[in-house]
């Protein structure tokens, strides 16, 4: 936190805003502190050493703390989507006017550097009532707010938060208006990826589904309600080896593992996902397929070899352990058989066959034959 005597901000009317104010009062971890500056200009901010970073509106980084300081501003709807706004920042814009443009009341609180609360929209009362409520009817001007509200519920649902009925009605109104179609894929995915990292990610998709947004943004998921319900139940069932930075990828993979290849590809393309997401989803779907087959008939060497080929186990051996761990969640005996098969098959190396004189297609065929032989031996 920048202290009041900080010479960089001395004489400026600055207020801490947004998540830092909200989460501190919830007892939630505070990671970032953002500030609003009232009564200043871009020229004044630069003169004080702030570095401008905002392309569409005046946001500056403190030269030492690197915290964000934004000039107070208002917004006016002038087009479609979340970018269709005219931003007005000037020394005449008040703090209350700046707070009025925000999405939810719990995000429309501010406080002075000394901790004095400024709360014109009843955010503290809604925080205490565990309520996500829109600030004003202007909520419907920004379709991204549908996703943001769902994401905040995914963060705080375990604390007892709910969405106000009148806010749910505005979310449905936004869906019916067709505004969601104007959201660019990158912003939809950015909110979704964040939601996958929240404590209760299933709530995000349930909320979008309830207001009709999921059918617009991710129709492949909404098309199969029973499959979606089952998939949402898997979001907390991940391999023990999964590290925090990989949690979102694994949760997405578990969410879409029940979809066919074409549906998964369509989703990945629509959302402009980074390649790591569809790659892992493909591996998890292949593993799911193996497990489903095993419920009907014990997989033979050919089926297990096909699975290892599908997840590219021979070149990316690090993939196998977490996938085996995933299998063990529901089928520990199968996971044990697969682990032994993998260990024995992995001992068959191309270099050995090259020394024996195998080359080209003959090398590949013999490698597959011996690996299958090793797997059959493991299966007994």
Image (tube, rainbow, N blue to C red):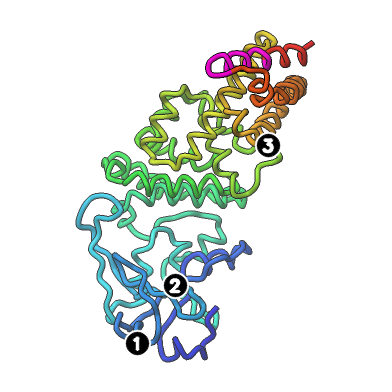
The quarter holding residue 120 reads bottom left
- Across and down, in percent, residue 167 comes to 40, 50
Distance (Cα) linking label 3 and label 1:
52 Å
* Residue drawn at (67%, 12%) of the image: 301
- Residue assigned mark 1: 47
* Residue drawn at (65%, 46%) of the image: 243
The quarter holding residue 136 reads bottom left
- Residue assigned mark 2: 68
Give 141 or 69, whichever is nearer the viewer.
69
| Magenta-colored stretch includes residue 76 | no
- Residue assigned mark 3: 239
Instruction: Kindly state the secondary structure of the residue where label 2 is placed.
Output: strand
Q: Are marks 3 and 1 in contact (CB under 8 Å)?
A: no
| Magenta-colored stretch includes residue 369 | yes
**First to last magenta residue range:** 359-371
366 sits to left or right of 133: right
């Amino acid at each position: 936190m920048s202290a009041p005597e900080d010479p960089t901000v001395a004489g400026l009317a600055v207020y801490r805003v947004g998540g830092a104010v909200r989460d501190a009062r919830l007892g939630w971890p505070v990671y970032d502190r953002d500030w609003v500056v009232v009564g200043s200009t871009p020229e004044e901010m630069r003169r004080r050493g702030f570095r401008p970073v905002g392309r569409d509106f005046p946001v500056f980084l403190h030269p030492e703390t690197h915290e964000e300081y934004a000039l107070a501003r208002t917004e006016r709807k002038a087009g479609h989507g979340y970018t269709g706004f005219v931003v007005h920042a000037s020394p005449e814009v008040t703090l209350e006017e700046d707070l009025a443009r925000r999405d939810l009341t719990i995000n429309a609180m501010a406080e002075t550097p000394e901790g004095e609360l400024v709360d014109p929209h009843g955010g503290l009362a809604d925080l205490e009532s565990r309520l996500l409520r829109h600030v004003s009817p202007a909520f419907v001007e920004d379709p991204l707010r549908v996703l943001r509200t769902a994401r905040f519920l995914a963060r705080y649902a375990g604390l007892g938060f709910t969405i106000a009925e009148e806010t749910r009605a505005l979310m449905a109104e936004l869906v019916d208006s067709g505004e969601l179609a104007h959201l660019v894929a990158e912003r939809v995915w950015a909110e979704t990826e964040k939601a996958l990292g929240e404590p209760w990610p299933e709530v995000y998709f349930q909320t979008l589904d309830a207001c009709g947004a999921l059918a617009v943004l991710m129709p492949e998921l909404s098309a199969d309600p029973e499959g979606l319900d089952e998939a949402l139940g898997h979001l907390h069932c991940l391999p023990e080896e999964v590290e925090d930075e990989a949690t979102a990828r694994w949760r997405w993979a578990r969410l879409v593992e029940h979809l066919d290849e074409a549906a998964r590809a369509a989703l990945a393309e629509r959302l402009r996902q980074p390649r790591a997401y569809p790659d892992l989803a493909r591996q998890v779907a292949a593993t799911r397929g193996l497990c489903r087959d095993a419920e009907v008939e014990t997989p033979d060497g050919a089926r297990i070899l096909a699975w290892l080929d599908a997840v590219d186990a021979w070149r990316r051996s690090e993939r196998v352990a977490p996938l085996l761990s995933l299998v063990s969640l529901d089928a520990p005996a199968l996971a044990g058989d697969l682990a032994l098969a993998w260990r024995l098959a992995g001992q068959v190396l191309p270099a050995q066959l090259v020394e024996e004189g195998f080359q080209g297609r003959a090398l590949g065929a013999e490698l597959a034959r011996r690996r299958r032989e090793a797997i059959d031996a493991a299966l007994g």
